[in-house]
Amino acid sequence: MQALRFAYKGFILWLLGCLFFGIGAPLYAAERHASFYWAKYSPDRFADIVRDLDAEFRESWLWALTHAHITAEGDWIRWELEGQLARHSGMQNHWEVNGVLVARWMRFPWDRWLDTRLAFGEGLSYAFEVPPLEPRSGEEDLQSARLLNYLLLEIEVVLPPRPEWSGFLRVHHRSGVAGLFGGVDGGSNFVGLGLRYAY
């Protein structure tokens, strides 16, 4: 477990370096994109949401603005650095900022009919208040923490008449990675829809 914590902290330091020192530099010759998405809280676990595609929802919401730079692009995968500003309302009310490294799979066999992309992101999330919805392991897990791990999973569809615009479905996930972040064992998931503009 100690080796896992050390490796994870090394990865986070590398990611922070990319975010803080790379994002202002000329990264990739072309594209950046900005997005807005709205999501609703689900008490289900991340793996259950993805596997079952039948999430339960509760009355708490998240609105997020994002901005991303493309850092590298191959034939199949595009790498991006994304920053997010999110506002929570409903069962919790606070601001949240996230920095994430995103790998976006760009090619599917049906792209000539419907250009589809699949993205996975890993990074850090900072909440300006301790989120009350994140403790999940039981009564002994009384609170979460402001700084936690962040994951995203997204499917994106490009709008055919206007390729600079796309729509997406995203799972927005914060967690303590089984105690790697201050012993936090809980987490939160928000599932939502968004709109993206590439320029």
Image: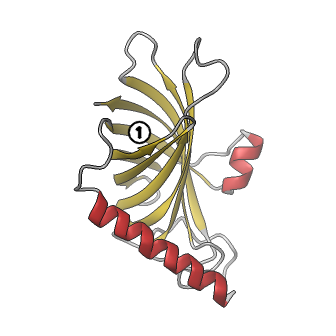
Which residue type does callout 1 highlight? Tyr
Q: Is residue 166 above or below residue 112?
A: below
Q: Which residue is mark 1?
A: 37
- The number of callouts visible is 1
Q: Is residue 94 visible?
A: no
Q: Nearer the viewer, residue 99 or 23?
A: 23
Q: Nearer the viewer, residue 51 or 162?
A: 162
Q: Position of residue 119 (x, y in %)?
A: 55, 43
Judge left or right: residue 141 versus residue 25: right
Q: Residue at x 55, y 33 (%)?
A: 106
Q: Position of residue 39 (x, y in %)?
A: 48, 43
The single residue placed furthest to the right in the displayed view is 52
The quadrant in which the N terminus is found is bottom right
Q: Secondary structure at mark 1?
A: strand
Q: Position of residue 66 (x, y in %)?
A: 34, 46
Q: Residue at x 67, y 21 (%)?
A: 109
Q: Is residue 146 above or below residue 119?
A: below
Q: Residue at x 47, y 77 (%)?
A: 145
**Which quadrant would residue 23 be assigned to in this image?**
bottom left
Q: Position of residue 103 (x, y in %)?
A: 53, 48
- Label 1: few (<14), some or many (≥20) within 10 Å? many
The quadrant in which the C terminus is found is top left
User: Which scheme is used to colour this image of the protein?
Assistant: secondary structure
Q: Is residue 89 visible?
A: yes
